[in-house]
Amino acid sequence: MKASLVAIAELHSAGKVGRGACRRGVAAVMAMVVLLAISAMIALQVERVRKQWDQDRVLQMRGQLEVLLDAALQDGIQQVRKDSSWTGGRWVLSAGVLQRCDTVSVEISVSGADVAVQVRSPAELSAAAVCRLTGKRSVKNEN
């Protein structure tokens, strides 16, 4: 910007540019600088909003995964209490259960006193939890 102002000043002193043209040139350069600054501020604001939306989406998905894990653990514990020889199962949930996921797979496995649950989804998030059956009625969560 300084170089362009110097060039305009040199043309003005040589008499090749009139005073009005010089002022219009300086005003145009200043207007472009102001527009560039405003554009940069708008771009930063848009980026901040986009990051906030991504963070909110991830938090919502984590909450949905926790609810799904709890439901699967409760189901696994109930199945083991009904039938001690039950070794596990798999749920395949349809589209729309988790946000932005086509399908979600929930695997429940039982090994001795441990009930393990793993949730897998095409999204970037997955989760796992283990509950240990410590007695007929008590459960210890090792999440």
Image (cartoon, rainbow, N blue to C red):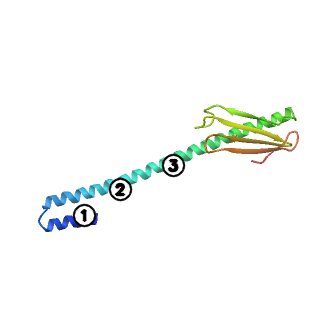
Q: Which of marks 2 and 1 is nearer the N terminus?
A: 1
Residue 85 location, quadrant: top right
**In the rendered image, which quarter contains the N terminus?**
bottom left
Image spot of residue 136 (x, y percent)? 88, 39
Foreground pick, 89 / 32: 89
In the picture of the structure, the residue carrying the numbered disc 3 is 51
Quote the CA–CA distance across marks 1 and 3: 38 Å
Badge 3: residue crowd in 10 Å (few <14, some 14–19, many ≥20): few
Report which residue position mark 2 lands on: 37
- The amino acid type, in three-letter code, at marker 2 is Ala
Q: Residues within 10 Å of mark 1 (few under 14, many from 20)?
A: few
Q: Residue at x 88, y 42 (%)?
A: 135
Binning the other alpha carbons within 10 Å of mark 2 as few (below 14), some (14 to 19) or many (20 upward) gives few
Q: What residue type is labelled 3?
A: Lys
Residue for point 22% across, 60% down: 26
Looking at the image, tell me whether mark 3 or mark 2 is earlier in sequence order: 2
Query: Relative to residue 59, is residue 25 depicted above or below?
Result: below
Give the x, y percent position of residue 51: 51, 49
Say whether residue 18 is left or right of residue 47. Answer: left
Left or right of residue 107: residue 124: left
Which disc is residue 67 wearing? Answer: none
- Spatial separation of the CA atoms under disc 2 and disc 1: 18 Å
> Which mark lies nearer to you, 1 or 3?
1
Secondary structure of the residue carrying tag 3 is helix
Residue in the image at 86% along x and 44% along y: 134
Nearer-the-camera pick, 48 or 5: 5
Residue 48 or 102: which is nearer the viewer? 102
- Name the mark on residue 4: 1
Location of residue 48 in the rendering, given as x and y in whole percent from the top left corner: 48, 50
